[in-house]
Amino acid sequence: MLKEKYLHGFSKTEQERLMRQARFLENYIYTDIDLSSVENLLEVGSGVGAQTEILLRRFPSTQLTCVDFSESQIETARAFLSENPVAKNRYEILQMDATDMDFNANDKFDGAFLCWVLEHIPNPVKVLSEIRRVLKPGSVVYLTEVLNSSFFLDPYSPNTWLYWKRYNDLQYDMGGDPFIGAKLGNMLQSVGYSNIQTTVKTIHLDNRQPGKRAEMINFWADLLMSGMPNLIDSGYVEAETAEKVKEEMKAVAKNPNAVFFYSFVQAKAYTS
Ligand SMILES: C[S@@+](CC[C@H](N)C(=O)[O-])C[C@H]1O[C@@H](n2cnc3c(N)ncnc32)[C@H](O)[C@@H]1O
């Protein structure tokens, strides 16, 4: 039986990992995101507030309304943001299900932002249609989502490949979609968004950037480990395989010719 409905779980370690993840990937994610003309932004699946902090910092004239269905994520986000002067009087966080949000049609929002969220939701198209319902016409929506089939690591690490396959299987079986990035264009089109643009962003690190590569490999090892309790508990991975993954990731980190490659997909679209 699957114990959690969320692959990574809601532990303190996982919440800290989300904070590190947001900062670590900030430059990859935000290079092409411009929300400076948005007055009221809706952030869906705001988690521990890690992206919220970046959004508030990067777009100082934007007010944020954040939505997440996890009480523990919301509590952490509130504690985190309350300490940040940039956030003062500029955000609210509401507990809601993104597939059925408690906002009026064409509410106050003129933009929406989602990052690493649709991949966990069984009905992502419903989320997109809810966002379209509550945003004003002509609003911009930015999505950033995974494409887990793009992951490549050298040297060859057979237990890590097996583990990654099972990690994605578990996410699928929990109702998520680890390959959703490639489908964003279709989904947005199916619920009537216009002017849809998608961009594939690739993190390709080799001997040309050894420092960044080392950081990325450590970051990725943490990501793999974050799914481990659920993968072992639900019988998707043997504890022995999980131990071998840790060894392989350490070996990759030490290898002077290691290669890391991963692509994710960003979409920008408008409500009409
Ligand atoms: C991987 S986290 C990403 C958090 C944040 N966007 C970030 O990048 O740090 C996914 C978040 O989506 C939330 N979530 C999942 N399904 C949801 C739903 N149906 N409605 C609202 N939030 C949901 C989870 O509680 C979790 O906080």
Image (cartoon, rainbow, N blue to C red):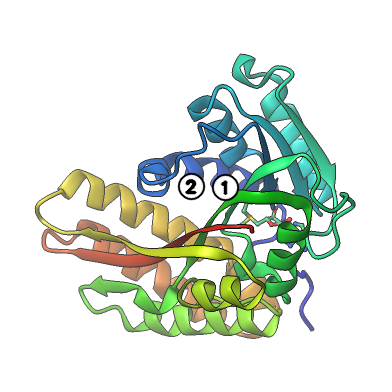
Determine the quadrant in which ligand 1 lies: bottom right
Q: For ligand 1, tell me if the residue under mark 1 lies within 8 Å.
A: yes
Q: Position of residue 39 (x, y in %)?
A: 64, 31
Three-letter amino acid code of the residue under disc 2: Gln
Q: Is residue 46 visible?
A: no
Three-letter amino acid code of the residue under disc 1: Leu
Q: Residue at x 46, y 72 (%)?
A: 243
Q: Residues within 10 Å of mark 1 (few under 14, many from 20)?
A: some
Q: Position of residue 186 (x, y in %)?
A: 54, 78
Point out the image quarter for the N terminus: bottom right
Element assignment for label 1: helix
Element assignment for label 2: helix
Q: For ligand 1, tell me if the residue under mark 2 lies within 8 Å.
A: yes
Q: Which residue is mark 1?
A: 18
Q: Which residue is mark 2?
A: 21
Q: Position of residue 151 (x, y in %)?
A: 35, 73
Q: Residues within 10 Å of mark 2 (few under 14, many from 20)?
A: some
Name the foreground residue: 11 vs 138: 138
Name the foreground residue: 21 vs 156: 21
